[in-house]
Amino acid sequence: MPETQQDKPPERESWKEQPPYRVHEVGNFDVKWKGKCHCGAVEYQLSRDKPLASKYCHCTTCQQLHGAPFQWAAIFHKTDINFPRGHHNLAWYDSANKSRTHHLPCKVQCVYCRTPIMDEGRNMILVFPTLIEGIHTREGREAFEVQSHMFYLQRVVDLRDGKPKFRGLSGGSERVDEETGEVVEGK
Ligand SMILES: [Zn+2]
Ligand SMILES: [Zn+2]
């Protein structure tokens, strides 16, 4: 059967009512951590004690978009975050297409102060722990401590912290030796 107009999804942008932007009712969301942008227009809550994983990403895209030597990314499920004001005050940037539309994966920022809020992937989100209240405490630092480094060959700074370093995404790519900065052969 040929596709008709009725077969197409509705024009309404329903993703704005789904995780991670679906607004949870007060009391229906177990708040473990809170974060906010520099100006305070964007606030969020996290319902998980610690991220699924925490990593430093040394890729050149992160270097440019964060204006920093590397990105600190804490991985959560989309259902682990609550933006009490939903999608309001958020802006998107799809780095693959250099577009501002909500096309996954994309970067999410505060529309006013432009603080990077998170990366939204197809299934997961990456939040940036330096926005989180309590990150400077011992408990905060321990909860968000990184396990590994990604895209380490693209680095602009050496970090000899003893954590595993990968050429690409952690786990699925070759290891990089921390001392020599070279790819480890046969591993
Ligand atoms: Zn802001
Ligand atoms: Zn990166």
Image: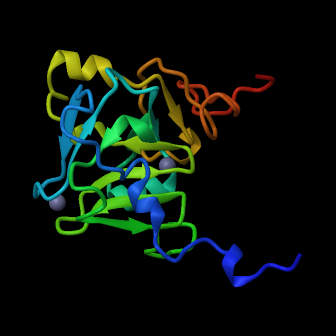
Quarter of the N terminus within the rendering: bottom right
Look at 26% across and 27% down and name the residue there.
30
The location of residue 132, given as percent across then percent down, is 21, 36
Look at 43% across and 34% down and name the residue there.
76
| Picture mark count | 0
Query: Foreground residue, 135 or 102?
Result: 102
Q: Residue furthest left?
A: 39
80 to the left or right of 5: left
Query: Foreground residue, 150 or 22?
Result: 22
The location of residue 128, given as percent across then percent down, is 32, 42
The location of residue 146, given as percent across then percent down, is 41, 25
Is residue 64 visible in this depiction of the protein? no
Q: Residue furthest bottom?
A: 5
Quarter of the C terminus within the rendering: top right
Look at 56% across and 29% down and name the residue there.
165
Q: Residue furthest right?
A: 1
80 to the left or right of 136: right
The location of residue 37, given as percent across then percent down, is 18, 52
Q: How is the image coloured?
A: rainbow
Look at 40% across and 61% down and name the residue there.
16
Is residue 137 visible in this depiction of the protein? yes
Query: Foreground residue, 144 or 29?
Result: 29
The vertical placement of 14 against 42, above or below, is below
